[in-house]
Image: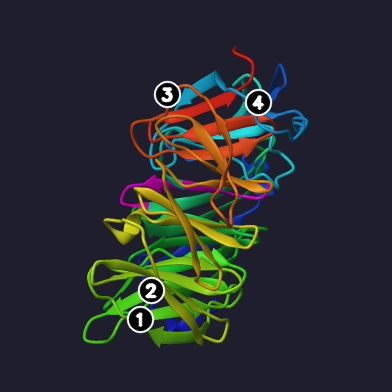
Amino acid sequence: MPSGGGGAVGRLHPVAKVGPVKAHRRIVLFGTVLATLGGLTTLVVPVVGGSDLVNTTLHAAAATPARPVTAALPAALRQIWSAPGVPPRAGSPLPTDTTHSSVVAVAGSHGIEGRSLLDGAIVWSYERRNAALCDWTLQQDLVLVAFRKLDGCRDLVALDAGTGVRRWYRTAEIDADITLYAAPALLVAANSRGLAAFDTGGGLTRWTFGRPGCTLAPPILGDQGVALLLACAGRPPSLVLLDTYSGKERWKLPVPMTGIDPRVLAADTDVTVLTRSGGAAVITAYDNSGRRLSATGIGVRYGTASQVATMVHNGVVVGWTGRQVFAAATAGTPLWTADGTGPAVGDGPVVLLAGPGPLTERDPRSGRVVRTIPRPAGSAGPEDVGRLGSSLVTITTAGTIVLGGTPR
């Protein structure tokens, strides 16, 4: 198992015991009962009462739902359906480039389900009655889920986003406080002590990364690799760029951490970092060799770096500080700021911003408001928004709401 930079192997410092990948075929050896209920195929395994198999129920769709036609949002939005969920990601739209984007994934305490974008009907579901959901994320046509038993997240599962069919399953004893991040072909489980990277095609371990006595900030996965900030006792803090496929350090350089800790914003064309010095926010950009390109002040308010969320859309870094949305060129040049209750989302030529009132579509480079869209009152707390078909999906810690032009 290759190890990025020689990180120690431990309980997600960065990873402990890694069990074998269990192919779907292996389940058949224990004997299964298949039953068809409407359009769903139910998998029930009558084995020992306390086993993982008997406590796992999968209702898979018989066929992949048709992809909705992508269209502009209507002039005004109404609620079509809603579903409760649980933190950390109560509900989440699939990425807009997925082939199964007619399904919205919603998480519960012990599993996850795919719901029809059109009416909220359950398309597929996966439940683990003897395990709690640790975290989950989405990567193209996969839903990737970690489940916890006892004191750690011991199981990783990949489900087909359109049908719920299980693509692969494996054991991986990682800590209960991990967060999952995904990029094409790569799944990263991360906490403040280390990273463990897995291949999304079959679940094999790619690499691990960690340093004894060091604290890791949340990683950012991008075209340049995996970027993160590393704070080690008795040493200057560092910005590190890891190779996506090997986990080896491509470069490491010191980063000033005065006041509130910085946060990596993006690792695509360039690696950009948000810091605060003397009460002013600064965006610093580095090229793929680690050379500093620019350091420019930007007038945004933020309380803690952990609130910062970012994306790259049409060559523009669009971030959220927990209080404001801001945009910057990938080379670090600030472009504009606006108030917002959650991260912006890319929608073709514009970015879509949520607020307590109407939604706004803005030009990503100038920030000019292209269109204002009335909608039902937004969430009082942070919310994510996503675009699927001609609908808007909003996600809070309480659940998922789908908005469209026709009431249910």
Query: Does dot 3 land on a helix, a strand or a loop?
Result: loop
C-alpha distance separating marks 2 and 4: 41 Å
Query: Does dot 4 land on a helix, a strand or a loop?
Result: loop
Name above or below for residue 359 compared with residue 116.
Answer: below
Q: Earlier in the sequence, mark 2 or mark 4?
A: 4
Identify which amino acid the numbered label 3 is placed on: Ala
C-alpha distance separating marks 3 and 4: 17 Å
Q: Quadrant of the N terminus?
A: bottom right
* Mark seen at residue 255: 1
* Mark seen at residue 229: 2
| Colour scheme of the rendered structure | rainbow
**Residue underneath mark 3:** 377
Q: Which residues are magenta?
A: 136-152
Q: Residue at x 48, y 51 (%)?
A: 155
C-alpha distance separating marks 2 and 1: 8 Å
Q: Residue at x 55, y 79 (%)?
A: 2
* Mark seen at residue 108: none
Q: Earlier in the sequence, mark 2 or mark 1?
A: 2
Identify which amino acid the numbered label 2 is placed on: Leu
Residues at circles 2 and 3 in contact by the CB criterion of under 8 Å: no
> Quick one: 298 or 201, which is closer to the camera?
298
Residues at circles 3 and 4 in contact by the CB criterion of under 8 Å: no
Identify which amino acid the numbered label 1 is placed on: Val
Image location (x, y in percent) of residue 236: 28, 85
Residues at circles 2 and 1 in contact by the CB criterion of under 8 Å: yes
Q: Residue at x 42, y 59 (%)?
A: 173
C-alpha distance separating marks 2 and 3: 37 Å
**Residue underneath mark 4:** 74
Q: How many marks?
A: 4
Looking at the image, residue 86 sits to the left or right of residue 101; the answer is: left
Q: Is residue 140 magenta?
A: yes
Q: Quadrant of the C terminus?
A: top right
